[in-house]
Image (spheres, helix red, strand yellow):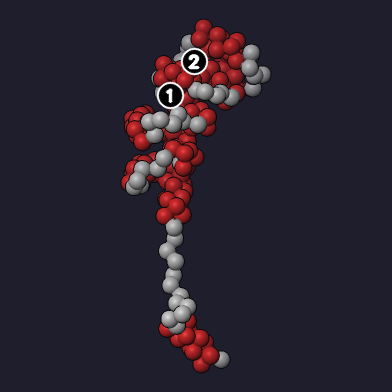
Amino acid sequence: MLRQCARARHRTFTSINNPVVPTPPSLNMQRNNLLGEVEALATRGQLNEALSLFYTLQPPPTQTHSNQTYATLFHACARHHCLQQGLSLHHYMLAHNPITPPDLFVSNHLINMYSKFGYLDHARQLFVEMPRRNLVTWTALISGYAQRGRAVACFRLFAAMLAHYLPNEFAFTSVLSS
């Protein structure tokens, strides 16, 4: 049995007609693995390491291929009170994706991040420029206004939202706290 295995290995590696050459992982698979590692680092609270790895990807990831990663990083910036990193990441995203507007998921995370930091003008501008919004979009901005004591803006936005969506408990809580 041992000799058969030795002969089989010899034939496999020396055969000219059917060489066995290990196939390297595709570039896309490597990129996806790296983006997964970036997300894992950000989720574990290692934001600086996650951003460092993200910024080293060459060519830079297009937003289309890394929406989940961008959203995870913006969420981590907001959660860990890292305004400067969030601003830098947003500028980086815009510089590498100048034509494509962020998708709904990424835009919601951006509005949430800017709202948490009190950059309500930035959040509002993103909101206005969005081609499509959902209940999360509206609620993120309503909550931002409520948290910053902007009751009139909070109520106006809430009233406008009612034409499109029924409020969830977060929107109600924000309006009531105003």
Residue at the image point whose x is 60% and y is 23% from the top: 135
- Graded by Cα atoms within 10 Å as few (under 14), some (14 to 19) or many (20 or more), the crowding at tag 1 reads many
Q: Is residue 5 above or below residue 38?
A: below
Measure the C-alpha gap from mark 1 to mark 2.
Answer: 11 Å
Q: Position of residue 32 (x, y in %)?
A: 46, 50
Residue at the image point whose x is 46% and y is 42% from the top: 65
* Residue type marked 2: Tyr
Residue at the image point whose x is 46% and y is 75% from the top: 20
Count of picture labels: 2
* Residue type marked 1: Tyr
Q: Choose top left, top right, bottom left or bottom right for residue 76.
A: top left
Q: Which mark is residue 145?
A: 2
Q: Is residue 24 above or below residue 161?
A: below
| Residue nearest the observer in this picture, 19 or 150 | 19
> Which image quarter holds the N terminus?
bottom right
Q: Is residue 3 visible?
A: yes
Residue reaching furthest front? 17
The residue pinned by badge 1 equals: 114
Q: Choose top left, top right, bottom left or bottom right for residue 24.
A: bottom left
